[in-house]
């Protein structure tokens, strides 16, 4: 009904999965849907995420984006269950214009999660989010969603993001007064364990990196966002207890 009313748009993929299966549909707000929310809930239009045409064309990013969306839904359930307060949950497919260091630069579309180094390079985590625990302050995390078996690519991305976190780029970007942490989800157990092993044995990493890095399987995170996170020593953590 919402699609017929032009409040939601729908993307259908005709890619067969075998045994009669098909890809899930993706739904997104239309401009008219965003205006309806503004009118009914009195939310400023500029605060509502409405995808541009370029953002909707995601055929090559389908499974990664689905995993990211499922992670966000699990996060929302976890926040509600624990009676925390969500401050924001920003994903890589939210776009901004200009750069953090040069806000006057326009016309350049980049991820809203982009973390820029002083030398002009950058790190683009899939998600940056913050939540607040009553009487215990705010917590800031960067999150990477990894699909496939490419351990080398994962290591490279995590090292780059780790450098950004150790330089305080996420905390500066979001005016936070504590260190941020890095969460990584994996499609495959074997890939996750290979990454943990290589990072734990990497003598080029500075001491103390274990306090920043936590790992989990995507399917577990989609069921319970806060449980079963492990560090470089394979020690288990519950995020709600941090």
Image: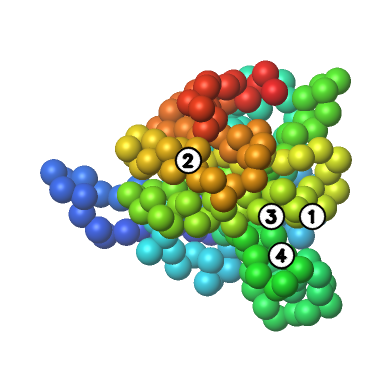
Nearer-the-camera pick, 171 or 232:
232
Label 4 neighbour load within 10 Å: few <14, some 14-19, many 20+: some
In the picture provided, is 174 more to the left or to the right than 35?
Answer: right
Residue at the spot of label 2 = 201
Residue for badge 4: 116
How far apart in space, not on screen, are marks 4 and 3 (Cα)? Answer: 8 Å
Work out how far the residue at label 2 is from the one at label 4, CA to CA, in angstroms: 28 Å
The dot on residue 164 is: 3
Sequence-first tag of 4 and 3: 4
**Is mark 2 in CB contact (under 8 Å) with mark 4?**
no
Q: Please name which of the two marks, 4 or 1, marks the residue nearer to the observer.
A: 4
Residue 240: x %, y % from top left? 66, 21
- Number of on-image labels: 4
What kind of element bears circle 3? Answer: helix
The residue pinned by badge 1 equals 173
Which numbered disc, 4 or 3, marks the residue closer to the eye?
A: 3
Up the image or down, 26 lies above or below 95; here it is: above
Element under label 2? loop
Q: Earlier in the sequence, mark 3 or mark 1?
A: 3
Which one is in front in this view, the residue at disc 2 or the one at disc 4? 2
Tag 1 secondary structure: helix
Front position in the image: 95 or 187: 187
Residue drawn at the location 63% of the way across and 25% of the way down:
239
């Amino acid at each position: 009904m919402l699609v017929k009313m032009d409040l939601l748009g729908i993307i259908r993929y005709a890619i067969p999965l075998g045994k009669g299966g098909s890809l899930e549909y993706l739904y997104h707000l239309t401009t008219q849907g965003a205006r309806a929310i503004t009118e009914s809930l009195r939310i400023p239009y500029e605060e509502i995420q409405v995808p541009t045409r370029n953002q909707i064309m995601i055929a090559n990013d389908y499974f990664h984006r689905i995993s990211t969306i499922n992670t966000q839904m699990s996060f929302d359930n976890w926040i509600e269950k624990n009676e925390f307060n969500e401050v924001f949950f920003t994903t890589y497919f939210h776009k901004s214009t200009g750069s953090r260091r040069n806000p006057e630069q326009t016309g350049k579309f980049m991820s809203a999660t982009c973390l820029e180094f002083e030398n002009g390079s950058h790190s683009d985590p899939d998600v940056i989010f913050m939540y607040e625990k009553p009487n215990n302050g705010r917590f800031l995390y960067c999150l990477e969603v990894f699909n496939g078996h490419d351990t080398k690519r994962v290591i490279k991305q995590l090292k780059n993001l780790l450098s950004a976190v150790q330089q305080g780029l996420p905390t500066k970007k979001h005016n936070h007064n504590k260190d941020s942490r890095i969460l990584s989800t994996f499609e495959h157990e074997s890939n996750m364990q290979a990454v943990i092993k290589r990072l734990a044995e990497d003598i080029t990493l500075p001491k103390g990196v274990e306090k920043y890095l936590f790992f989990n399987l995507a399917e577990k995170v989609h069921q319970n966002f806060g449980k079963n996170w492990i560090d470089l020593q394979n020690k288990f953590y519950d995020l709600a207890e941090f």
